[in-house]
Image: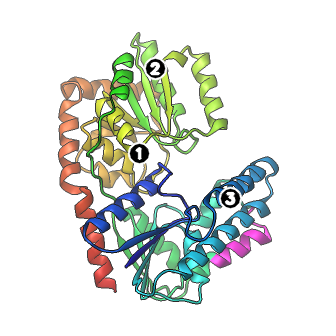
Amino acid sequence: MIAIISMQNPIRDTNGVASHIRDLYQEIKSNDIEVNIIHPYNFDYYNSYFTDKILKLFSKLFKLLKWEILFYFKIQLIVFILKNKIQNLPAHVKIINVHDIISLIALYSLNRKFPHSFYTLHANYEPDIEFIQSGYFNKNSYIFKKFQSECKKAYTIPNLTIACVSKHCKNLYEERMNHKFENFNQVIKIIQMGVDLKFNIDENISKQISSIGEYIINVGKVTDIKNQLRLAEIAFEFQKLGIKKNFVLIGEIDKSYYLILKDYLLQHNLDECFYFLGALSRDNAYQWIAHANLNIHTAKMESFGLCIIESMGLGCPTFAFYYPTLQEIFYNFPEAILDSNQNTADIVRKIRLIEDKNMGFRLLADKQRKECISIYPRSKIINHLMEVYTKET
């Protein structure tokens, strides 16, 4: 039996990590292998509603008061819940696959040990660095140093394999682990994400798409790291050229960043061109992506870029601003990489030039789709993962 552990709710959440966990679960199950997902929000031992409310309360209090102790208490609550759930897994569980550092800390704190454990790393940075950058901890505080110590201990779990989702991520992690530990001997492997692009058509979505007409799409949480303000600047540049473009944004919305973005749109008379759809089911998101004229991915950083792979596979011509891992995905079509240091006028000029050369982007879209189908099918990726599971155990 394989147990997949996450601090997120992969049944409810719509981000790339949650989507990957759902895919992993479905593909393993389709191979007649017993598999279970453990997260803090299911009903096995704790009331899901109560847990959800408590964790959200800690998050709200932290945003209001900015006390890092509240964030740390939230982490400890999640560790406590996961620890109890993992401890009570059946005896025949042979493989544990955790998907975040909080779950890894919970696994480390157990009296029970498993034959082999996998930590799938979905980020370019270690979690303690990410938490500092996100403002959850003060790097000089006692609480942060305590959390760092817990993270470091978690990496010493016997028979732990770290699975990175890109070559760039693996290289970074090896460098950091060798710097952090005198004798770091855990196995680090590359296991990329894969996609299954079948989706059900919703007639109501079809009507909404028809009512908007042609549009450019952007997929990802509306937040500073995803940098949708750059998309608004591109829209304004098109407007200056007398070209009206509609933009559809799919993803959860960070309210503070949304207000900044909305202010820019209102100042530049772009408000009516932008459609914020919020988080959607995969079927609905795929339907919107498949009908888009173009996808412009504006994120400043990604560990991989699952939504880029999905867009390519759905036949939507896809551009993205440079980040290191993008070179692995766009190796055969570097023309689709946008330079974040270029001014917006030059970026729009480049997009229009490629459109003219590619029969309305069709040549680019065909190349990207073929590559996605060849390299990133979900079944192929999961088969590789199962080989790693088997070999390491």
> In the figure, residue 51 lies in which quadrant?
bottom right
What amino acid does circle 2 point to? Glu
158 sits to left or right of 130: left
Mark 3 residue crowding within 10 angstroms, few (<14) / some (14–19) / many (20+): few
User: How far is mark 2 from mark 1, CA to CA?
Assistant: 20 Å
Identify which residue is drawn at 33% across, 26% down. Answer: 206
- Mark identifier at residue 237: 2
For label 1, the SS is loop
The one nearer the camera, 31 or 262, is 31
What amino acid does circle 3 point to? Phe
As drawn, 291 above or below 61? above
Identify which residue is drawn at 57% across, 21% down. Answer: 265
State the residue position of label 3.
Answer: 50
Q: Residue furthest top?
A: 242
> Which secondary structure dominates the residues rendered in magenta?
helix
Give how far across and how far down residue 384 sits, in percent: 26, 70
State the residue position of label 1.
Answer: 322
